Amino acid sequence: MNPWNHDVAKDENDLVDVQVDGVWTRMPRGLNVVEVAQRAKKFIPHYCYHPKLSVVGNCRMCLFEMGTPKMGPDRKPVLGQDGKPEIAWMPRPQIGCATNITPGMGIKTDSPLVKDCRNGVMEFLLINHPLDCTICDQAGECKLQEYSVEYGTGESRFIENKVKKPKNVDLGARIVLDDERCILCSRCVRFSSEVMKDDVLGFVNRGSHSTLTAYPGKSFDNAYSLNTVDICPVGALTSKDFRFQMRVWFLKETKSICTSCGTGCNVTIGSREGKVHRLTPRENEAVNSLWMCDFGRLNFHFLESKDRLHRPLLRAAGEQFPGTWADAIQRSADGLKKVKPEDIAVVASGRLTLEELFVLKRLVTELGVTRVDTVLNLGQADNFLRSGDGNPNRRGTELLGLSSGGRKLGSWGAEIESGKIKALLVTGGEDVVAAGISAASLAKLELLIVSGISVHETTRMAHVVLPGAAFAEKTGSMVNVYGRLQRMTRAVPPPGEAREEWTILRDLRIALTGGNSLHSVEDVWKSMAAEVSQFSGLSWAKIGDLGIQIESVSQPAESVTG
Amino acid sequence: MAITQHRLIFKHIDAPGYTRDIACYRKHGGYEMLKKGLGMGGAAIREEVKKSQLRGRGGAGFPTGTKWGFIDPSKVTKPIYLICNADESEPGTFKDRQIIYKDPHQLIEGMILSCFANGVKLAYLYIRCEFTEGWRILETALAEAKAAGFLGKDILKSGYDLEIHVHRGAGAYICGEETGLIESLEGKRAYPRIKPPYFPAVLGLYMCPTIVNNVETLCNVRHIVEMGGDAYAKIGRPNNTGTRLLCVSGDVVRPGYYEFPCGAVTLGQLIYDVCGGIRNGRKLKAVIPGGSSAKVLRAGETYKMKAKDIHGNTVDREVRLEDLPMDFDSLAAAGSMAGSGGVIVMDDTRDMVECLANISAFYAHESCGQCTPCREGVLWLKKILARIAEGHGKEDDPALLRDVADRIAGRTICAFGEAAAWPVQSFIGKFKEEFQIRIRRNGTAAKTDTVSLTH
Ligand SMILES: Cc1cc2nc3c(=O)[nH]c(=O)nc-3n(C[C@H](O)[C@H](O)[C@H](O)COP(=O)(O)O)c2cc1C
Ligand code: SF4
Ligand code: SF4
Ligand code: SF4
Ligand code: FES
């Protein structure tokens, strides 16, 4: 996925001796000094270096003092009293990002010279910087701020006029650039050209007047452009969506996954007081590395949409009226009881969590319903992260035997028309009208129960609408198209009376069968792990923040199309 | 007393009746060395170059034989490229253009020999964009050489093929830095590369082994083939062999370009004898001996140098500025450098504040802007100096200038950092009182809230 992975050693077991700040240690051969220092718990500050991009060495923040073993007349290293090589230190500092370790190398990360180098770079970076932190979105997560505190002097000797550069530059559909804040590290340029193969960014002018810009006549809006906002060490690149919305230090961070496609990029949800403000990618080399697509990143505003379902709705005299959860569950259960199991069809959504699907499976089994299928939700795959599968948990529906890949669903319209299907339960907010069952057909149903998130054609036809929780509002797990089991965690509560769908399905089950042994999502997980071989022996704790591979799917099944 | 030059490279330049066409060049023995070289074989030429102890004339004085030795044509599987650096942009330097304009075939012959010696099949001649006429001259000369069978396929029936392309520079000083040049040749901004890992000999043009040599250096190869390395090494002084083209500008009676064996003339002889002394009967104040980036030398200075006494022991010797031999090692020992051979002479009317402000303005304009200390620091230097020159200097400005320069040199991607810092370090170090006087004279007028109008 990445052209470079400087943080990964070629061979973790091929170790060489290096001395870091006076202490000898063994580190994998070929790693660069920034990475080695990190592993030795000696942080070397850096701006331009990024483990997934080519090394250009332009910021000079990572300068360190380097030494090599002193050679004796016999061309062998001279050993000191400790039996380790004596080190000859070079007078000039070297850059850690472009220096790979060799046996016997000496590394000083905080000598007086190194400190002076960093202090110098900090001063240089700030002399022409606008210092408009008070109105800058990066404040609070800005490397210029952080390193200033850590390595700067806190005062300026610069009394000349600052260089003026363009501000508020519209770089593309989703990004605004402030050239005065740009420290010219070229991370964004390299990301776009090396990872996205989109050579659209570059510098013009020389010296201190150097300016980042998009190629004349082009705009910077490839499908992954917002990742540059993340890797920009300063507030030069800002997301139009997030800028001026919220101070980052107020954001609660919740580890979760993106559910906008089958890849399930790992994300951090930034929220405050029940409102999601942004999604940012969370590093997971097995899934998305450090990146996510712009579509997935911005696909959370529907959480706040006025179309969200806040309360249960019950149909009476041809119209839907708000009702209580008790009435809605009772009405659903009563309705389902009146219909023979063979006349019932259930849409098991690939957007539900495994836990929700498992409760649904229990329900379906207990009722004796066999007409169960998923909606495909095909999307546009790209050649990078985005999967053609719009369902984040299609694999989950398959593992639980709740999908026939949309084959059954294809004939349900006709079966409703012919009276074979009398009741339909739709989960996960699926819009079956969009999936090919006409509203006219739905009108013929004796019972249509829809548990969903937002209003659409299908919910409008429903006899009972059960408002559910969307991705950021619920806790559970999913299996992505590559067979990786991953956790998601609730960041904000669902709106109004809406509930996580597993509790809706649980209550429906109680109303129908009278029994329940599932009191928490963990309970659901435990029962599922006991029943489904792929999950046996696994606990939530074991899944961890980065998920685990439960099967290996090299070719993600975009083939579901056929 | 006029000292006679030893013209090797400049032998025919400005000679009456000498023209730059191939017929004239051949009439004077041109391309005979190509025939000789092709007969010797590449390894033999490389051996002679090594024996000659030739050092690069582009600025750093790196031994050419060693540079070539990094590449073993018999082992390399990728193409090997050779680039002639004809970007000549260091202020005070105007030697390469004489060769290009007046004797282009000498350069082409030197290039073909160097390419042949190193197994190069494709070479580039990167010429400073402002040399418009020079570019046309080179294109014509290359066409002539090709028509005569000295370039192209199967050169002189030797089985050796070579193409040389002229590439016009991108109009920036940094295009002369060899890795910036390579980037520029690849069609990109002339951003110098980090070394390691991008040493031209390993990962040069198109990530292939590449030799970059200056115009004058490559011309010398022709003469080394003619004389043999040992004989060439007898010209000049040990470790400072061959002749050196010197470009003298500034306040002398006869500024111009001269050629002497390395170290054969002293700085004093060059200024007073060769160039007729300081103009208008004035006195020498300072001299920059190797292009504007070299550290300035102040009249009246003496330098401690190592020398051998009659018993062969190394002893310290005091050498006056006037007695400094014009060679690599002596100028380095004096704390400056032979650099690009551009000798800039300043008389006692020159205002050192203005001189340095002028030099710094050049470097601020030419910094490529890639790395932090140079990009930000050099413009800062320029702004402080402009402010002092405009009469708004502050007491601690000299110390600040010094400090800023110290934090640039040695911490940048390419040697431009030093090129910009050295003048500041040396001017402030050697003429501190001039800066102080200038600042104090304007002291009452100086307002810290008044800032330079020059950006
Ligand atoms: C900022 C800078 C500018 C340079 N400009 C030139 C130049 O114009 N011409 C040149 O021959 N070398 C120039 N050099 C030196 C080249 O990098 C390189 O060392 C030289 O071309 C090698 O040739 P030589 O070994 O024959 O001297 C420059 C170096 C620096 C750092
Ligand atoms: S915009 Fe940000 S990432 Fe891009 S070069 Fe400037 S500072 Fe670096
Ligand atoms: S690739 Fe898929 S999972 Fe990843 S961010 Fe985009 S939509 Fe979300
Ligand atoms: S030292 Fe100056 S010229 Fe050289 S790479 Fe850095 S900014 Fe560019
Ligand atoms: S991190 Fe920027 S130079 Fe190394």
Image (tube, coloured by chain):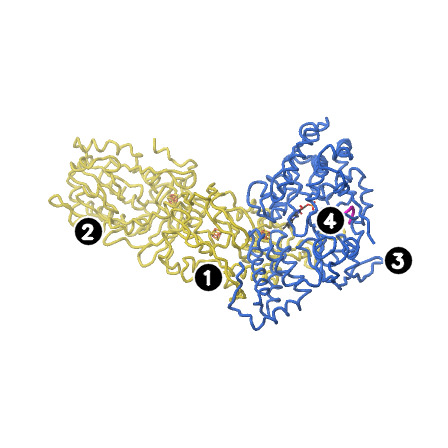
Q: Which residue is mark 2?
A: A325
Residue B424: horizontal and vertical position, in percent?
64, 61
**Magenta stretch in the rendered image:** B240-247
**Mark toward the start of the polypeptide (1 vs 2):** 1
Which label sits on residue A131? Answer: 1
Asked if marks 4 and 2 touch (Cβ < 8 Å), the reply is no
Q: Marks 1/3: CA distance? A: 65 Å
Residues flagged by tags 3 and 4 on a common chain: yes
Q: Marks 4/1: CA distance? A: 50 Å
Judging by colour alone, the chain drawn in blue in this rendered image is B
Quarter location, residue B13: top right
Amino acid tagged 2:
Trp
Q: Marks 3/4: CA distance? A: 36 Å
Residues flagged by tags 4 and 2 on a common chain: no
Amino acid tagged 4:
Tyr
Which label sits on residue B257? Answer: 4
Q: Marks 1/2: CA distance? A: 54 Å
Foreground mark, 4 or 2? Answer: 4
Judging by colour alone, the chain drawn in yellow in this rendered image is A
Q: Marks 3/2: CA distance? A: 110 Å
